[in-house]
Each structure stands twice: as structure tokens, then as C-alpha cells.
Image: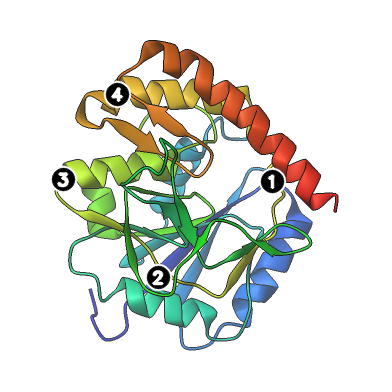
Amino acid sequence: MSKDNPLFSIITIVNKEKIYEDFKRSLESQKEVNYELVKIDNTHNQFFSAREAYNDAIKKAHGDYLVFSHPDMRFLDQYALRDFLNQVIKIRDLGIAGVSGCLFELHHHKSTLVTSIVHGDPAHHFGQLIQETTKAQTVDECLFVMTKDFYKQHPFSDIKGWHMYAVEQCLMALLDHKMNYVIPARMWHYSTGFSENWQYIQTGREIVRRYGKQFSSINTTITTWNTKSKINLLVVPPVKLLKHKIWRKFNLAK
């Protein structure tokens, strides 16, 4: 790896070409970033899960760092990506870094989401605003980074579906004695967040089955997974998912 000018492989799954083209234009506006763009064509549902798609794409990636981004991420100025990635490469114990995530500590038994990006359309702030790099238990899937070396040791698992793949990588990192971070970023994730569905609940329960013995809770940007209570695991995540979707619909309708 070149410490002075590392190569970043920016990997994105494309379901709609128009959204991807807009993402590509935003990316091309970025200055002072040494990157390659790896497009995963899923316009005909070629893949059954994000993990499968990413594992396949990484075979083509040459970067020292792997940047996984939703195609509906936008950069708010020409140096937004450079400044974010400059902070990433300074981290010595890096597991996973992201632009949004959840703290280790719970507040009134709930996850605390930390970020500095804006979200939705119209754009709005969501969660607790941060101004410095912050340790986190997990990060959100919208944009996250790991080293190629970390990936070689911890490829994406065989869990099916399109949810919690960054969360799972974060848990792997912690079990490998590395740390995860949320880094302030001048970015916009304009998704309305309506992709969460029953598959999200199934994936979460599988994550708890695989990793729950090592963590008292798994804190995510959608809900908190209590790993020690079977009743809680059955009831709380579906209810919180419903409340989350209603909240977003109500606030975006304003």
C-alpha cells in the first residue's frame, strides 16, 4: 500500500441506471482522490444479496482501501470525499469506518445514532451531530470503508439479503480487536429509507444467532437488537421497524 497516495476502490451496486449516472457525476466532481470505480450491475437482479455482489466485485478491485457506497450518496463539495478519506487513512486500528453509525452505549435502552451527513429529500439532519471522528459499535451501509487486507481476512458472509452487511463487518472487526469509527462527512444520502422490510428482521435475527453471544446488544441505525432476550428479539425489532417507517413518512411529508 502506498501511504502517500493509496488507491480507493469505490464499489456500488446499481439497480437503476439513472441513479448510478447521477452518483457517477457527483463522484467525478471530487478532487484529490486516487480512486477507481467498480460498478456492480444488478439491473436484472443478477445477485441475491449484497454480500454476494460485493464478494464478486472485489475480485476486480485493485484498491488498498475498499469504499462501499449506495448509489444515492452525493458529495456536497469538491473536497468532501478527500477530507473523509484522509481521516480514514490516519486510523491505525481501523476495522470499519462510515459516515453514520451507532455508539456502544445505549441511551434509555436505545441505540444512539451519530453522523454529520444529511438524509432524505428534502435533506434533513438525523441523529446526534458529530464534529470529530467517533468510535462506534456499528456503521450504516450507506457508505463505509475497510482496508483490502481486512477484507482478505474477513470477506462478506453467506447471509442472504440486502441488509446489515456493514453491521456484520463491524462485529467481525471488534472480535478481531479492531475499532470502528464514524467520521464527519459533507455528504447527502437522499434515500427515503423505505428499503427496510421483513427481510431486515430475518437478517437481524440471523446476525444475533451468529454473534449474539459476544455482544449484549447489537446497535444499528434502525433498531437495537437485544441479544439476551428471546421475547425482546421476537417483538421489539418489528415494532421499531414499523415506527421508524411511520416516522420517516410523517417527517418527509412535511
- Gap in angstroms between the C-alphas marked 4 and 1: 29 Å
Q: Earlier in the sequence, mark 3 or mark 4?
A: 3
* Residue 72 occupies quadrant: bottom right
Q: Is residue 156 visible?
A: no
In percent of width and height, residue 118 lies at 63, 65
- Residue drawn at x 40%, y 35% as measured from the top left: 109
* Residue 149 occupies quadrant: bottom left
In percent of width and height, residue 35 lies at 45, 74
- Gap in angstroms between the C-alphas marked 1 and 3: 33 Å
Compared to residue 21, the image places residue 163 above or below, namely above
Other residues around mark 4 within 10 Å, as few (<14) / some (14–19) / many (≥20): few
> Which residue is denoted by mark 4 in the rendering?
210
Indicate the secondary structure of the residue bearing disc 1.
loop
Of the residues tagged 3 and 2, which is closer to the observer?
A: 3
Q: Earlier in the sequence, mark 1 or mark 3?
A: 1
Indicate the secondary structure of the residue bearing disc 4.
helix
Residue type at mark 4: give it. Answer: Arg
- Residue 8 has which mark? 2
Other residues around mark 2 within 10 Å, as few (<14) / some (14–19) / many (≥20): many
Residue type at mark 3: give it. Answer: Asp
- Gap in angstroms between the C-alphas marked 3 and 4: 15 Å
Q: Earlier in the sequence, mark 4 or mark 2?
A: 2
Residue type at mark 1: give it. Answer: Asn
Q: Is residue 185 visible?
A: yes
Of the residues tagged 4 and 1, which is closer to the observer?
A: 4
The foreground one among 184 and 28 is: 184
- Gap in angstroms between the C-alphas marked 2 and 1: 22 Å
> Which residue is denoted by mark 3 in the rendering?
176
Of the residues tagged 4 and 2, which is closer to the observer?
A: 4
* In the image: residue 177, left or right of residue 103: left
In percent of width and height, residue 2 lies at 24, 79
